[in-house]
Image (cartoon, rainbow, N blue to C red):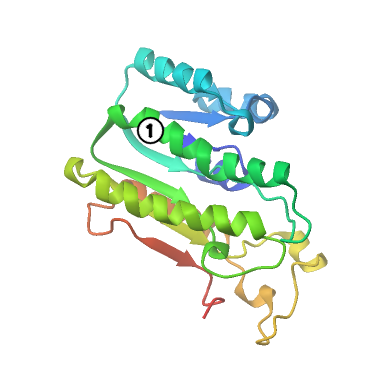
Amino acid sequence: MKVIIGGLSKLGREYLKTYNSKVLILEHAEAIGRHINFIKEKGYKYFPIDFRYLTQEELEGLGIFLRELDEEISSVLVMSGTSSTQSVHSITLEEWENVFSVSLKGPFFAVKQMLPYLKEKGNIVVISSMNSVMPHPKRADYSLAKAALNMWVKNLAVELKEKHIYVNAILPGYIYEEDYYNSALLYTKENGKMVGDYLISYEDVVNLIQYLLEKNFGAMNGQLFLMDKGFSL
């Protein structure tokens, strides 16, 4: 069984379109409700959990659910994340805590519940961001949360090495969306690079996810794979 944390984002749904085996989706109830027909059509299992308001009771409930499910987990894909799009001048404490809860704290403790069920030579792939290694305006909280994810990946790789569980992160750059061409995100940086010249596709990211989850036999572990067509160079 494959577990996808935050699997109902646009990227998550694009990935799920290519995968038809056993899947357990961890997502907040509102997202599950919006996509319940898609979930049922695919035959996926799901567990509603809201990282914004995560409690010990919810985590224990997830542990009970996994124990009763009694299935070995082959891989975990962590895709949960959010951004307040605020600057260091404007961000509030509530916004900061929301971003870190959804992007870091929630996945951290959810994965902890799954570790007893992860099979040897399994894989964990975490979706981080180019912004974790490159500054960006109005990403004060998002960039820091994603940078922390990167370090979590490296720590997990070390701690799970004896069980031969491989942990890696993908750091996507700007992913192509039609509205990028009509939004403020298409801007000229001081070095003269246009965002539009460096857009990657959802397919690019999905292909790397699939490779790391299905074909990584341990040569890559604790690594951060930056996908930005050289934008950060």
Q: Secondary structure at mark 1?
A: helix
Q: Amino acid at mark 1?
A: Lys
x 44%, y 56%: residue: 150
Q: Is residue 84 left or right of residue 67?
A: right
- Asked whether residue 20 appears in the rendered view, the answer is no
Q: Is residue 61 left or right of residue 66?
A: right
x 67%, y 47%: residue: 96
The answer to whether 223 is drawn above or below residue 78 in the figure is below
Q: Is residue 172 left or right of residue 66?
A: right
* Residue 168 percent location from the top left of the image: 36, 53
Q: Residue furthest left?
A: 162
The answer to whether 184 is drawn above or below residue 17 in the figure is below
- Asked whether residue 227 appears in the rendered view, the answer is yes
Which is more toward the observer, 84 or 92? Answer: 92
Which is more toward the observer, 186 or 150? Answer: 150
Which is more toward the observer, 147 or 5? Answer: 147
The answer to whether 96 is drawn above or below residue 64 in the figure is below
User: In which quadrant is the N terminus drawn?
Assistant: top left
x 58%, y 64%: residue: 131
Q: Residues within 10 Å of mark 1 (few under 14, many from 20)?
A: few
Which is more toward the observer, 76 or 155? Answer: 155
x 66%, y 83%: residue: 193
* Residue 217 percent location from the top left of the image: 22, 52
The answer to whether 215 is drawn above or below residue 112 in the figure is below
Q: Which residue is mark 1?
A: 112
